[in-house]
Amino acid sequence: MNSITSPDHPSRYGTTSDIKGTGLGLRGVHIPEILAQLPDIPWFEILADNHRAGGGFIPRQLEAIRQHYPITFHCVGMSLASPDVLDMTYLRDLKRQIRDFEPAWVSDHLSFSQLEGHHYHDLLPIPYTEESLFYVSRRIREVQDILEQRILVENVSSYVEFNESSLSEMEFIHGLLSEADCELLLDINNVYVNCQNHDHDAATYLESIPLTRVREIHLAGFEAFPDYLLDAHNNPVSSAVWDLFRQFVERRDDIPVLIEWDNNIPEFSRLREEANKADRILARQRRTQVA
Ligand SMILES: [Fe+2]
């Protein structure tokens, strides 16, 4: 790792806009209730891919949400680690969406979903090597140059590890933050799922996170199968992940948090309970610091 510089060197594009508190992933089924009641939610995360080429929510509804709340864009289609050339049509569409809706920031995943022109509906992991590190870093820099802003890159859940990997996931992420000049979207549920699936220690993993480069935290629920955990986003955040979150906020309590719940979507009030729990943990941590 000697060839990799510190992740704290100055960024070409500066930091992304500011958002505070615990936000929610926006789901179409909740929009009428949100617009009718304008609940006290600090921000919403929008899955930008759902709104390409006029798809997704009625644009008028999305614009109405945007009038009342800060938003961020979450993406699944950049395919940052794909061997294919960058999808310029996708990126040009995304840039237009960014211009129209002005998200505070844009994120995607440390994975690939496109190979030889075929789109897979999965976020597929890659081997962690020096070669893949510099390859993915170069692609992220290219994406940032096209979008003219820094992006957030999220650690993904995985169900296999590669014999070819010569770096740990955390060594790879440290290198990526430095070489790609991006920020980190830390998904604590993904950390837990991976550590359970691959027999690593989640607490040790979190302790090695480069704190200054974490721009957003994801919390979500998994589904437990006999031999593995599936990052299914169809359940409440588990007690084990809440424990890891508490551990993390002892080190930093000022990072925006996002509750992801994409399948078996509950009532909006249930989603708010999850966000309120995250806020209570953050508030308790801040009181501890003051005392
Ligand atoms: Fe996530």
Image (tube, grey):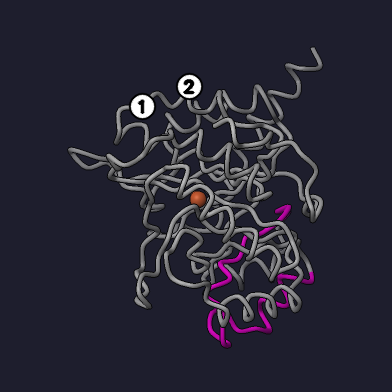
Quarter in which the N terminus is drawn: top right
Query: Taking the image as drawn, is residue 180 in sight?
Result: yes
> What residue is rendered at 72% in x and 78% in y?
63
Q: Position of residue 254 (x, y in %)?
A: 74, 35
Quarter-of-image position of residue 105: bottom right
* Residue toward you, 132 or 157: 132
Location of residue 159 with respect to 248 vertically, above or below: below
Outermost left residue: 226
Which residue position is annotated with label 1? 200
* Residue toward you, 251 or 156: 156
Q: Position of residue 25 (x, y in %)?
A: 57, 58
The verdict on residue 55 being magenta is yes
Quarter in which the C terminus is drawn: top right
Highlighted range, magenta: 40-67
* Residue toward you, 17 or 261: 17
Find the distance from the CA under tag 2 to the CA under tag 1: 8 Å
Q: Residues within 10 Å of mark 2 (few under 14, many from 20)?
A: few
Q: Residues within 10 Å of mark 1 (few under 14, many from 20)?
A: some
> What residue is rendered at 71% in x and 71% in y?
65
Disc number placed over residue 150 in the picture, else none: none
* Residue toward you, 206 or 57: 206
Mark 2 vs 1: CB contact within 8 A: yes
* Amino acid under disc 2: Thr
Disc number placed over residue 204 in the picture, else none: 2
> What residue is rendered at 60% in x and 65% in y?
46
Relative side of 237 to 252, left or right: left
Relative side of 104 to 264, left or right: right
The verdict on residue 170 being magenta is no
